[in-house]
Amino acid sequence: MDSLRQLRYFVAVAEELHFGRAAERLGIAQPPLSQRIRKLEHDLGARLFDRNSRRVELTEAGQILLVEARDLLARWDRAQRMVGKAHRGEIDALRVGVPPELAGRVLAAILTTFESRDVRVDLQELTTAEQIRLLADRQLDAGLLQHPVDVVGLELGPEVETPLGVVLPRDSPLAARSALTLADLAGLGLVIFPRAAAPGLYDATLRTCWEHGFRPTRVQHARNPEFVLGMVLSGRGVAFDQGMVAQKEPRVVWRPLTDALSWRLSLAWPAAAPHPLVRELAELIVTVIQGDGASRPAPAQEVAQRPWNVVFGRS
């Protein structure tokens, strides 16, 4: 505990850059504060502040410690809150990020199951990239991520793999077929979510298209299902989907793809001091998603990520 107190003193001085103001903020006298800082510097074997009669500045070592100290103190404060709530029989609301494409039935199942236990679930519609940022900032307790994605500092629940099909206009010659390959789409454009939303998935999807003979003549970005439908109907390209988008519009059809094109999802959460219910939520999501009869547990494999220019062979 004494080490945590020293870090709090250090953060106060680092933010104020003035020992007198920091001491006033902490409610202690200045001499003991100065002694604490000197002891911390001695323990760490590094000078944290450059001091003279007119100013106080952080050294490079001090700048590094400030970042780490803020993170450690935030984690400790969160741990204290969670322990206290658990002791009193209380549990924080579960803040969960979900991708915009997630089916309504999955959302309903999550909410129904957890709220029946008097645990409030705060679902937020967010892209994978947004979820990664908020998980790192501890503003989310868990996020349903689209793979491949960088998950450093996170734990992952079981992955679920969902095969994709293609959405195309009903009057397209390809609509007469019961199933298609990616090579059948040659000469067409593609409507897909913006790369910034999920860079790993974006690159992997286009790489798979390239490897199976489909090089889109144009790439149109769209996230909203209605916008996707509008682009498909106007001839801007076909779209990949699990079958839900086509149900909204009779002028388009959905056909399964026989190629190995699929999207993978799993729940992720901070490795340190996670919410006590995240693992249970991860198992529930797997069960619900697999209930569609098409999704399945994803095989244990590492999907190589390549930059966008590799997909199109650009220098």
Image: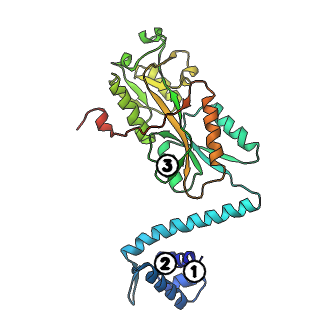
The scheme the figure's colours follow is: rainbow
Compared to residue 189, the image places residue 24 above or below, namely: below
- Residue 145 image point, x, y percent: 52, 41
Disc 1 crowd rating (10 Å Cα; few below 14, some 14-19, many 20+) is: few
Lower sequence index among marks 3 and 2? 2
Q: Where is residue 98 drawn, in percent x and y? A: 57, 41
Disc marking residue 16: 2
Q: Is residue 251 above or below residue 70?
A: above
Q: Nearer the viewer, residue 10 or 192?
A: 10
Identify the disc placed on residue 25: 1
Q: Residue at x 55, y 36 (%)?
A: 100
Q: Label 3: how many residues lie within 10 Å, few (<14), some (14-19) or many (20+)?
A: many
**Tag 3, which secondary structure?**
helix
Left or right, 203 with reference to 233 = left
246 or 163: which is nearer to us? 163
The residue lying at 42 percent from left, 27 percent from top is 191
Q: Residue 107: percent from the left, percent from the top? A: 64, 36
**To which residue does mark 3 refer?**
132
Residue 205 drawn at (x, y percent): 40, 31
Quarter that holds the C terminus: top left
Taking 271 as reference, is 14 above or below it? below
Give the spatial CA distance, label 3 vs label 1.
34 Å
